[in-house]
Image (cartoon, rainbow, N blue to C red):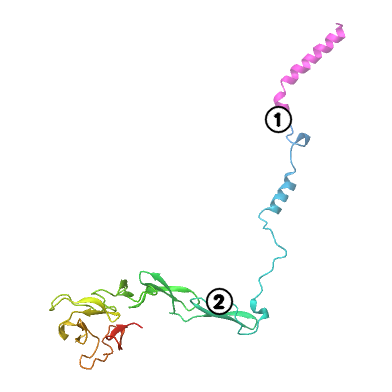
Amino acid sequence: MTRRKLALSAAGAALLAGCSLLVHFDDAAVDPCADGGCLDVTEDAVDVVDGAGDAPVDAGAEAPADPCATLPDDASCGDADPCNARPTCRAGHCDRHPLEAGTFCAYLGACQCGYCNGSGACADTTACPQGFNWEAGVDIARCCGGLPVLTSTNANCGVCGVQCRTAGVTKAQNCQLLGGHYQCVDCNANSECWSGCCAIDTTPYHCSESNCNTGACVQGLCPSPSHCVQGTNEPNYCSYD
């Protein structure tokens, strides 16, 4: 090896040695975005923000047309419901017709009834009235004192409030069908009947909502809101109809 080469080698070694002492400076100065390693944050961020939360828009969507736009006044434009009469057209618009506040609109169960609020909604709830028929088709299914009962018992015989006496009488009375209607049967004296009249024109005897002398109904004798119905081929009876 020549001296020149040795000299160069020595200089190179010295240079390498010097570089090893400065490595930490070189590391700190490395550009993290060299060779295209970074994205253009500003441009991409704008793209993301511009597209965020945008709902798809149906350019062809249109608001539904009023059905009365092509119908004459008073033409039907919908259906009736428990709290609204049939809506009708007026001056090109469909007008609602809410029923009067307090109109019955639903049986809610347990002798609770729903009523219209006057604005077209079945929103008011209160106890069903005395004698309310809580099961359609079953005439003896009635609300008595706010409870759903069957008016075929000694406590409520035929209608709410008619009580058949079972104690303090000659013979215990019993609520039974008589002429198609429930009556308190087996009375023995007028004084033993809730109505003050023990009718003896039928067998068995029964407590009648009648004038015992004429057989005519005594209006106001049946518990309100029921009333006496004059029988034709059957005894008189209390009814809600």
Q: Residue furthest top?
A: 1
Residue drawn at 87 percent across, 9 percent down: 4
Residue drawn at 45 percent across, 73 percent down: 123
* Count of numbered tags: 2
Residue 98, position in %: x, y? 51, 79
Q: Quadrant of the C terminus?
A: bottom left
User: Helix, strand or loop at disc 2?
Assistant: loop
Quarter of the figure with residue 233: bottom left
Predominant secondary structure, magenta span: helix
Residue 166, position in %: x, y? 17, 75
Residue interval drawn in magenta: 1-29
Residue 194 shows in this picture = no
**Given contact means CB atoms under 8 Å apart, are the residues at marks 1 and 2 in contact?**
no
Q: Residues within 10 Å of mark 2 (few under 14, many from 20)?
A: few
Q: What kind of residue is marked 2? A: Asp
Residue 47 shows in this picture = yes
Seen in the picture, residue 58 relative to 66 is either above or below; the reply is: above
Going from N to C along the chain, the mark reached first, 1 or 2, is 1
Q: Return the residue nearer the eye: 204 or 95.
A: 204
129 is within the stretch colored magenta? no
Which residue position holds label 1? 28
Quarter of the figure with residue 54: bottom right
Report, in whole angstroms, how far the alpha carbon at label 1 lies from the one at label 2: 79 Å
Which residue position holds label 2? 79
Q: Quadrant of the N terminus?
A: top right
Residue 24, position in %: x, y? 70, 25
Q: Residues within 10 Å of mark 1 (few under 14, many from 20)?
A: few
User: Helix, strand or loop at disc 1?
Assistant: helix
